[in-house]
Image (cartoon, helix red, strand yellow):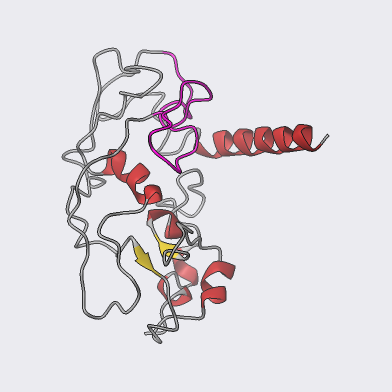
Amino acid sequence: MKKLALAFAAALYASSAFAQVAGSPHDFTDGFTGNVFTATADSCTFCHAPHNANAGQAGAPLWNRATNAQAYTMYASATIDGAQAAAPGVNSLTCLQCHDGQNAIAVTFGSGNLGAGNVGTLTGTLFNLGTTVANDHPIGVNYDPAADTTLQPILTATGAGFRLYNYGGTAVANVECGTCHDPHNNVNGNFLRVPNAVGLCGACHTQ
């Protein structure tokens, strides 16, 4: 009974996520950057595969893209008092799989090339972050109000709709792309977890 309940909950979540992605900027079923994706696929397939998923990208759920082994130039600052990772965490790596401009959106791990020759990347668009993420909000950093007193108490951040990532060890509350962005829900625009108008920055920062 417990397994049945878990399976039912997973199915509900998947259908809800599909409904939110469909028609959003993350829905590539109608093509991308002038490239028509002629292969049959739903909007989830560009990132997820229920079968033949990539188990090599540890921590990525049913991942349908190649393992991201790209090296990135990270944000570095003496004003960050919490622990800083040398590379993005897995949550950010999944986002950067497309947003670093290095990979074709239509080429998947288990489903092949969904573009039938028209692959398309984010190169040349506003959404291409490149492989240097030093000029963006820090990722792979530990949210630690005890070390950095300019941060709001951690319960304030998580309670406001944000998400922190537990990678074990000292990285039990890491800030990643998914801290502020929900790739499955664009109701707030720019896939923000909370509306910018309610004080996006002030939920974590006191100054």
**Residue at 17% of width from left, 56% of height from top?**
73
Instruction: Quadrant for residue 122, please give it.
Output: top left
Q: Is residue 115 above or below residue 63?
A: above
Between 95 and 5, the residue placed more toward the observer is: 5
Q: Main secondary structure of the magenta part?
A: loop
Q: Is residue 83 above or below residue 139?
A: below
Taking the image as shown, residue 181 lies to the left or right of residue 78, namely right
Between 18 and 197, the residue placed more toward the observer is: 18
In the rendered image, the quadrant that contains the C terminus is bottom left
Q: Is residue 159 above or below residue 132?
A: below
Tell how many labels: 0
Q: Is residue 43 magenta?
A: yes
The magenta-colored residue range is 40-64
Instruction: Quadrant for residue 202, please give it.
Output: bottom left
**Residue at 46% of width from left, 30% of height from top?**
48
Between 189 and 73, the residue placed more toward the observer is: 73
x, y percent for residue 200: 44, 69
Instruction: Quadrant for residue 109, please give it.
Output: top left
Q: Is residue 73 magenta?
A: no
x, y percent for residue 196: 44, 65
x, y percent for residue 195: 49, 62
Q: Residue furthest front?
A: 169
In the rendered image, the quadrant that contains the N terminus is top right
x, y percent for residue 23: 47, 34
**Residue at 30% of width from left, 19% of height from top?**
36
